[in-house]
Amino acid sequence: MATLHRPAIHRFHDPVLPEPRRSSGPVGDRLVFAFWAGAGMEVPGTGRRYAGNRDDAVMTMTIREAGPDDIEAIISVGQRTWPATYGFAGPEYIATGLQTWWSTEAIRRSLENTTVLVAEQDGAVTGTGNIDLRGETPIIWKLYVVPEAQGTGVGSALISELLSYAGGRPVRLEFTAGNTPAAAFYAARGFVEIRREAGERPGWPETVWVERRFAE
């Protein structure tokens, strides 16, 4: 597992998220968010809904570094998000991506070479992301949230914590052209397009590279 880094944190304001508290646990340092959830709101990853007639339930979201015990849960995130996200790119694109980037061996390599984070809500892993700090410019290779947890602040919390590892350096990431929600999400957080690459196979969509620079 990648070494836990704690550089100076450079955060951007995101109104979706409450003020977090940092705590430690058996997996290491973690960021914990607690916020109110309305009655009838689904508990992500469980199929249950909050009971009651008032907004009186507290949903807890934890962002922490992943370990080997999280491999199956991380793979599950990929298996649930890729078909829902990349239908426009075709079944071959989805199958190849899952085989290449979401296999047990691929996740093990990520844990060895990058900092991998997971988001937990009520005990279920609902999102994951990783950042590669080995080069001059850190790269976020993955940022995925299961469909039922999208819009609950998981993606915002994950990218905020991933950016904190960069120590003020510019950060780059890539997404698939045609993924309109991803384009809007990253643009809203200060990422600007720097280049495009052709799809790896004929008929596959382009890859869009974007970069975020921190204010001096």
Image (tube, helix red, strand yellow):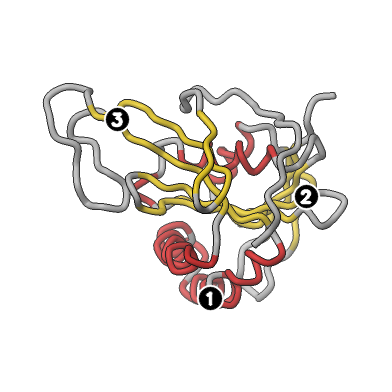
Q: Which residue is mark 3?
A: 58
- Location of residue 2 with respect to 59 vertically, above or below: below
- Location of residue 130 with respect to 63 vertically, above or below: below
Q: Is residue 144 visible?
A: no
Q: 71 and 37: which one is in front?
A: 71
Rendering coords of residue 84 (x, y %):
41, 59
Q: Is residue 50 visible?
A: yes
Amino acid type, label 2: Pro
Amino acid type, label 3: Val
Q: How many marks?
A: 3
- Location of residue 161 with respect to 144 vertically, above or below: above
Badge 3 element: strand
Asked if disc 3 and disc 1 are in contact, CB closer than 8 Å, the reply is: no
What residue sits 41% from the left and 51% below the top? 126
Q: 181 and 121: which one is in front?
A: 121
Rendering coords of residue 166 (x, y %):
76, 42
What residue sits 64% from the left and 43% below the top? 162
Q: Which residue is mark 2?
A: 138
Q: Earlier in the sequence, mark 1 or mark 2?
A: 1
Q: Which residue is mark 1?
A: 103
Amino acid type, label 1: Ser
